[in-house]
């Protein structure tokens, strides 16, 4: 056994900044009024981060890449069947069930941020691209935006429940590695390819630029 760097710095920053932004989006939406401006800015940033994470899933470090952790239904079923055993073999990166949780979370966040661009609150706030569609279509997209937020809450609840299950039942802390990046390797697996911080910065800048153009140019 030994400590192995599993979660690279770009991935860890993505995770915790996303947590803060989702919380900001929820609170600002509940407050309403002038806080909706914060809600919209938070949504743009979430869209930027999700686009970055998708790219990082192909260009990042070993454990950040989708190809390294996304498995088929058989692997997921087998993992869930063995999950109740405390001594079940662990996974250095995402486990098969957690992998699909990541994919679903990214998909739901992408839909949430995307629909927010076309939504309206029938009062004083509308997404920057709402004017590009009819009011009726904007209302329908707004309904999707509201329903999708419920799916997001469900996924967050499942995620937190899984973290608690691992901590209290399997005696494995999944939160600490998301701060430090390191996990204990039970199989003797050594560190593999690490993601480039400079590449991550360039990808993030490109995603931010794309979202800025989308919001300011198309929405002008």
Image: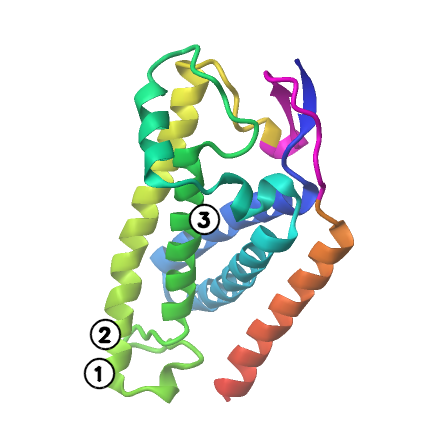
Task: Of the two numbered discs 2 and 3 on the same chain, state the one appearing first in sequence.
Answer: 3
Q: Which residue is mark 3?
A: 23
In the foreground, 21 or 184: 184
- In space, the residues marked 2 and 3 are separated at their CA atoms by 25 Å
Task: Please give left or right for residue 109 compared with residue 21 in the image.
Answer: left
Residue 12 in the image, given as x and y percentages of width and height: 62, 41
Query: Which mark lies nearer to you, 1 or 3?
Result: 1
- In space, the residues marked 2 and 1 are separated at their CA atoms by 6 Å
**The label number, if any, that marks residue 113 in the structure image:** none
Residue 216 falls in which quadrant of the image? bottom right
Residue at (53% x, 79% y) in the render? 214
Can residue 219 be found in the magenta stretch? Answer: no
> Compared with residue 10, is residue 172 higher up or lower down, i.e. above or below?
above
> Compared with residue 96, is residue 120 higher up or lower down, i.e. above or below?
below
Residue 16, can we see it?
no
Can residue 186 be found in the magenta stretch? Answer: yes
Q: Which residue is mark 2?
A: 140
Q: Residues within 10 Å of mark 3 (few under 14, many from 20)?
A: few
**The label number, if any, that marks residue 136 in the structure image:** 1
Residue 84 falls in which quadrant of the image? top left
Residue 124, can we see it?
yes
């Amino acid at each position: 056994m030994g400590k192995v760097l599993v979660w690279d710095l770009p991935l860890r920053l993505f995770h915790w900044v996303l947590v803060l932004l989702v919380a900001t989006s929820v609170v600002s939406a509940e407050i309403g009024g002038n806080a909706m401006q914060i809600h919209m800015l938070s949504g743009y940033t979430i869209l930027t981060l999700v686009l970055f994470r998708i790219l990082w899933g192909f260009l990042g470090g070993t454990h950040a890449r989708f190809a390294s952790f996304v498995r088929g239904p058989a692997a997921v079923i087998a993992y869930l069947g063995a999950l109740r055993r405390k001594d079940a073999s662990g996974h250095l990166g995402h486990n098969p069930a957690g992998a699909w949780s990541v994919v679903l979370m990214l998909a739901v966040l992408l839909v949430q941020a995307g629909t927010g661009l076309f939504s309206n609150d029938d009062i004083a706030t509308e997404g920057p691209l709402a004017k590009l569609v009819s009011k009726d279509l904007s209302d329908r997209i707004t309904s999707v935006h509201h329903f999708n937020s419920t799916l997001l809450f469900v996924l967050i609840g499942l995620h937190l429940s899984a973290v608690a299950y691992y901590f209290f039942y399997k005696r494995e802390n999944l939160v600490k590695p998301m701060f430090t990046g390191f996990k204990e390797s039970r199989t003797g697996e050594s560190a593999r390819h690490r993601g480039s911080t400079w590449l991550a910065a360039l990808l993030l800048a490109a995603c931010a630029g794309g979202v800025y153009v989308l919001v300011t140019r198309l929405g002008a």
